[in-house]
Image (cartoon, helix red, strand yellow):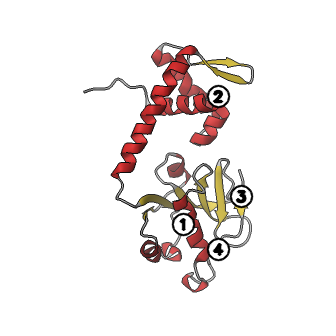
Amino acid sequence: MTYALPPLNALRAFEAAARHLSFKLAAHELHVTPAAVGQQVKALEARLGVQLFDRLHKQLILTVAGQAYLPGVSEGFRHIAEATSQLRPAGVVLLQLGVHCSFDLRRLDLAAFRSTHAEIGLRVLHPAGLHELVEGKVDLLIARGLGHHPGYRCDRLDEGSGLGDWLVAPEGTADCPEVAGFRDWLRALPAEKALANRRPRLVGVSGS
């Protein structure tokens, strides 16, 4: 059976904006700009031929059509999430870690992490950057930079100021058990497992 569906990104933008009644908050959740959310919703309205929101001064209100559409869209995303979770091995949560190209993976002692965290199925994409994190290809990222990314929690891995290595995760998932478990692992790494003077120690948090 062929399903006539609007673009998935447009549906995600509508669903998030409808829950928050705010393009700004939806953008924060989806890690895009408010303008991008507005454009996606506008494109969806054009495709459907109905207006989903009344855009008032500093206020967003669902139209009757938008109110009728939201439950089905939300339920559809819930079913997709449940079907996806059922594909995972029992007792295992998959965690996708992106790492920038010049980072030495030996600093992380990933084999030891996997042996002591059997409940987390860790996969590594190397190299990877913020683009992969924004697109959802990875769940968290070790990035090289200044560590200031609105909408993301950034924990520094090395000492000093300026450019450095940071563990970056979306604020909405930064404290979920598997991400927190990996962050705790980095904090607990003994000094002898580091290479030379490049110890992976979390020394600060950059807010959004």
Q: Name the residue under label 3.
A: 206
The circle on residue 21 is 2
Quarter where residue 14 is shown: top right
- Distance, label 2 to label 1, CA atoms, is 34 Å
Residue 48 lies, in percent from the top left, at: 46, 17
Comparing labels 2 and 3, the label whose residue is closer to the camera: 2
Q: Which of marks 1 and 4 precedes in the sequence?
A: 1
Q: Where is residue 110 in the image (x, y as percent from the top left)?
A: 46, 73
Q: Which mark is residue 182?
A: 1
- Badge 4 crowding class, 10 Å Cα cut-off, few under 14, some 14 to 19, many 20 or more, is some
**Cβ–Cβ below 8 Å for labels 4 and 3?**
no
Question: Between disc 2 and disc 1, whose residue precedes?
Answer: 2
Q: Relative to residue 89, is residue 191 drawn left or right?
A: right
Task: State which mark lies toward you, 4 or 2.
Answer: 2
Q: Which of marks 4 and 3 is nearer the N terminus?
A: 4
Q: Find residue 201 and name its label.
A: 4
Q: Nearer the viewer, residue 50 or 164?
A: 50
Residue at horizontal 56%, vertical 56%? 176
Question: Going 64% across and 28% down the picture, which residue do you hit?
Answer: 21
Q: What element carries label 2?
A: loop
Q: Is residue 33 visible?
A: no
How far apart are the two marked residues, 3 and 1, measured between alpha carbons? 18 Å
